[in-house]
Amino acid sequence: MSAVKDVQHSLNVIRQLSAEENAHVQQQILELMLQASISQLKSIGTETQSKDTAPNKPAPLPIPKPAKPAAAKSKPKPKLEPSLNTRINRLRAVKPQEPKS
């Protein structure tokens, strides 16, 4: 746990020092920190890979079972209203008539 506290203290010092610098210097500081983090992650990754000889296979997913049909209940079907096209087709043209005076 002391290593974590030391690293946290160092990061706080870096943060304080970089806050006083311009943007270019802050970017260089972040790049250095990122490179150090990447190399540390790679070294940790090679250590764990050398310990694990066989890759861990993920557990197989369970096969879902089809839902059982519920008791057959007769639902009344809603009465469908004719569509607009059907209603338009039912309209018939009326022959024009002369006006009655």
Image (cartoon, rainbow, N blue to C red):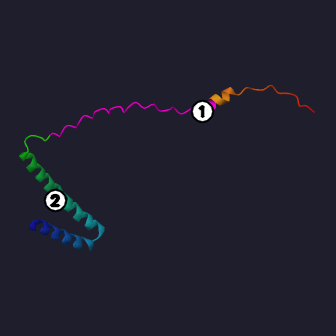
Q: Is residue 16 left or right of residue 92?
A: left
Mark 2 or mark 1: whose residue is earlier in sequence:
2
Q: Quadrant of residue 4?
A: bottom left
**Element class at badge 2:** helix
**Element class at badge 1:** loop
Q: How many marks?
A: 2
Q: Which mark is residue 36?
A: 2
Query: Label 1 crowding class (10 Å Cα cut-off): few <14, some 14-19, many 20+?
Result: few
Q: Quadrant of residue 1?
A: bottom left
Q: Which residue is mark 1?
A: 81
- For image coordinates 19% across by 37% down, the residue present is 60
Residue segment shown in magenta:
57-85
> From the viewer's perspective, is residue 2 above or below residue 53?
below
What x and y, as percent, mark residue 67?
32, 33
Q: Which mark is residue 4?
A: none
> From the viewer's perspective, is residue 65 above or below residue 25?
above
Query: Label 2 crowding class (10 Å Cα cut-off): few <14, some 14-19, many 20+?
Result: few
